[in-house]
Image (cartoon, helix red, strand yellow):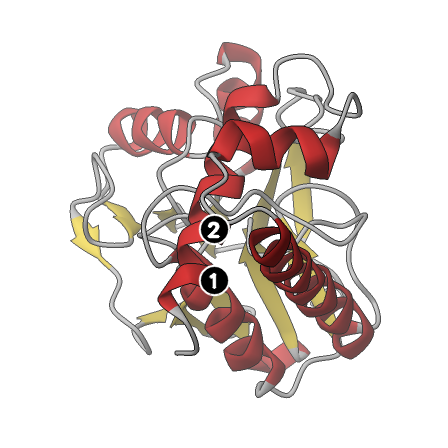
Amino acid sequence: MTDRPRFLNAGNAGPFTLDGTRTYLVGRSAVAVIDPGPASDSHLRALTQAVEAATSVTVVVTHGHPDHAPGARSLAASLGTDLWGPAGVDGVSRPLLDSDVVATDEGDLIAVDTPGHARHHIGLHWPARRAFFAGDLVLGKGDTVWVGEYAGCVADYLASLERVRSLDLAIIYPAHGPPLESPEGALDRFVEHRRHRIRQMEALLAEMPGASGEELLAVIYGKQLPEGARKAALRSVEVMKAHVEAGPT
């Protein structure tokens, strides 16, 4: 067994995906393929070649966003196997419930519900390596991910970070960016960033009662938003505003 899992990069680098979607492969004969990414022909060919000697392949998707799920659906279909993942994600034929097991010859992977970035989102705990495949719960760089998909996502996200903190981890493998070799410190960064945004929103709403999402967006981000990020940032501001207005949970 190797110390770290193999991974193939889907080649879809960008402001939200960093170096691209990292598809992890755990196992050699009984293999789990985690987050096959977008439906890129070259990436899917590479994944198919990487598992051609395996006796069994389990295709797993952590959530349904387009940089994760389309390739998972395509790969599962081409291999004639089920797609494992959260119930509610399009194309999932084998729902993974919290604590369900994905077996590999390098150790079991345990499903962990981690909603927040997406309503239907899981991570995979790899106890044999004290490792966690985080999907988009955290990134390999920085201190924030997009949290804006649904009402209540901010509270869910913070709870998911705390749940992962309770695991005995030596390393976290995000779907974007390099591994996080100091899990506790990384989780602290992501928690503190989100709590900073909550405090910021509390202060703004005290100063600007009744402010619209657009008005709050202008104050929080000014002209710092990268091209193409405005819609996502506005949604994030709106759910943060709703979280603060709802009061303590």
What residue sits right under mark 1 in the picture?
244
Q: Residue at x 48, y 23 (%)?
A: 38
Q: Position of residue 124 (x, y in %)?
A: 48, 65
Q: Position of residue 31 (x, y in %)?
A: 47, 53
What residue sits right under mark 2 in the picture?
241
Q: Badge 1: how crowded within 10 Å, few (<14), some, or many (20+)?
A: some
Q: Residue at x 56, y 71 (%)?
A: 161
- In the figure, 159 relative to 48: above or below? below
224 displayed left or right of 95: right
- In the figure, 80 relative to 171: above or below? above
Disc ID at residue 119: none
Q: Secondary structure at mark 1?
A: helix
Quarter holding the C terminus? bottom left
- In the figure, 83 relative to 182: above or below? above
Q: Amino acid at mark 1?
A: Val
Say if residue 110 shows up in the picture. Answer: yes
Q: Position of residue 227 (x, y in %)?
A: 69, 12
Q: Badge 2: how crowded within 10 Å, few (<14), some, or many (20+)?
A: many
